[in-house]
Amino acid sequence: MNWELIFWNALYTAINAAAAGYCIIAAGLNVHVGYTGLLNFGQAGFAAVGAYAFSIPIVEYGWSWYWALPLMLVCSVGLALLMGLPTLRLRADYLAIVTIAIAEIIRLFLNSTRFTWLTGGTDGRNGWTGFFEDLNPIDNTARYDLGAQSIDGYRLFMMIVGWCLVALISLFIWALMRSPWGRVLKSIREDEDAARALGKNVLGFKMQSLIIGGVIGSIGGLWLSAQKQSAQTGEFATTLTFFAFLIIVLGGLGRVKGPIVGTIIFFFVIQFVDNILEQGTRTENIPEWIVDSNNFGVVKNIVAGLALALLVVFRPQGIFGDKREQVFDVR
Amino acid sequence: MSADGATPVSSAAAAAGMRKDDPVLVADGVVRRFGGLTAVNVDHVEVESNRITALIGPNGAGKTTLFNLLTGFDTPDAGVWTFQGHDLAGVAAHKVARLGMVRTFQLTKALSRLTVMQNMRLGATDQRGERLWAGPFRWLWKDQEREITERADALLERFKLAHMRDEFAGSLSGGQRKLIEMARALMTDPKLIMLDEPMAGVNPALKQSLLEHITSLRDEGRTVLFVEHDMDMVHEISDWVLVMAQGELIAEGTAADISGTQAVIDAYLGAHHDVDLGAMSDAEAIAELGLEADVLDPAHDDPGQEDRR
């Protein structure tokens, strides 16, 4: 088995531009779930809005990026208001139901044949990443070696800028969460009636949290699509939201480092298992009764899921969580 | 028990709802129904400023529900009330708190995964750093934060929690949680502080210091309204006692007055606690209970009738 290739493959998957996109989406979700206790199961919806509200005006109406970007931000704020206004008064479970429903509505709308003229339907939206290509100081088509991997200039650029973006957003979240504003969010997570009794406008703070995390999620969705130079609806299914949940739980809920650590571990493990199984079946190092070349995709998910489950069981606070916090009963 | 004239409630009820010289809180006609059950039905009640007022009554009397209604945590079916002249009907809970009417909860709400100091800082009102736009920029709020921290430290010292300052609030004992909740409420600098069973689950040693803390609140010019079951405590510190039963305010007065009032005894023990209904004939029992004959099902000669009504 070529362990070197397996390792570099896994490492590349963990740190490539797509991983940066996932990391940003998870960071937004962390604001909702980790800091405020809002069970948002529709983060994929925010990501889809990020990709499509940016690409549609550029492709369909010939806008330039500096108009498309504000439109994207406005749409994502609008989505947060749409999700939040009817449900933030209610218990957390209702928000979960509404968010997952809205995210699916968005995906089905983008996918429907009726609106193909606008959304590109199943083909998605292509040819709108000229802005990023022009921005790239290195040759977009040249090949660059990363260990045993070889990637083109565009991917390299998107990877580097993507992680810079992750750093910037993490810094922003860190600055917000150490402030009295972040303290109110955490108090709402613990017990919103207590916050209310101390004169905090709980509804307003929840709304602000939903907007901030949603906009961050939209930026992540935009990045996810921009790095593959195409906005695809398949990317924004509910699995995206669940991956984001896994990432923040792995890294530690309510931790600034959480999404970064979680992303790297998550994609490394997934890709590592995938490559071992793939090579194992090809070289017949793994007996066929365990896994063969037809079903290794399924087995990969089982093994990776098991590995992640074990990680969560034995380190429930996540990699960077504070063990002390787990001691206290959390509803 | 309804004051329909037939029960002995009526004589004491005349005193209930009396006017005060300097009321800080005045409520009129506050009614809250849960389906068929009328949980609260208070005609008129006033809470005197700068006094410790106890709100007592048997379980299910509607004390906590009244607390919830007055502080905006629940919405009444009818009624108006004012706090220092501000009309509070329909005002959201957080605005009530900002006006200076702050409550604690029967089940303490110490925020477990925040430290004791963070709990305290949270209590301060009008924090610039709580605005989203100012949050990321520390220089905009660090001076105010320092001032808040000083105030919090002083309060922690007073409530003997200073040694727990940087511990998670989840590691506090039950009694300490009561203390931190009270201290945190004081960070808002309230005019009226409403304590829902401050003594529940507190050990006797801590009880005495809690009593002193509550008295000191009055001494610094605040008004205290508290719900309590511990009658010793009520006798010891309250200036005035309000008695509720079955949603209504049935009596009020000083603690000494109240303990002799027939209506209060009836509310706690049942109006017929000293007669044996089972030994009477149906007709006698009905007369004793003051009921119309057709209210009772003649098939049952049930001495437990009164208790269940």
Image (cartoon, helix red, strand yellow):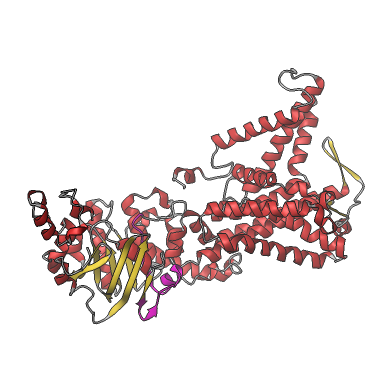
Q: Is residue B192 above or below residue B234?
A: below
Can residue B241 be seen here? The reply is: no
Residue occupying the point 85% across, 56% down:
A129
**Image x and y of residue A309, in percent:** 60, 34
Q: Quadrant of residue B70?
A: bottom left
Residue name at image x 81 percent, y 57 percent: A115
Front one among B181 and B163: B181
Q: Is residue B18 above or below residue A106?
A: below
From the viewer's perspective, tell me whether residue B147 is left or right of residue B17: right
Q: Which quarter of the picture shows residue A82? A: bottom right
- Does residue A56 appear to the left or right of B38 in the view shown? right
Q: Is residue A45 visible?
A: yes
Q: Does residue A155 sit above or below B225 in this rendering?
A: above
Q: Is residue B106 magenta?
A: yes
User: x, y percentage for residue B22?
Assistant: 26, 81
Name the spot of residue A281 as percent of width and height, x first.
78, 23
The answer to if A117 sits in the magenta stretch is no
Question: Image point 75% across, 63% down: which residue?
Answer: A72
- Residue under the point 73% across and 22% down: A291
The count of marks equals: 0
Of the 4 image quadrants, the one containing the N terminus of chain A is: top right
Span colored in magenta: B81-107
- Is B250 or A174 nearer to us in this picture? B250
Where is residue B59 drawn, in percent x and y?
26, 56
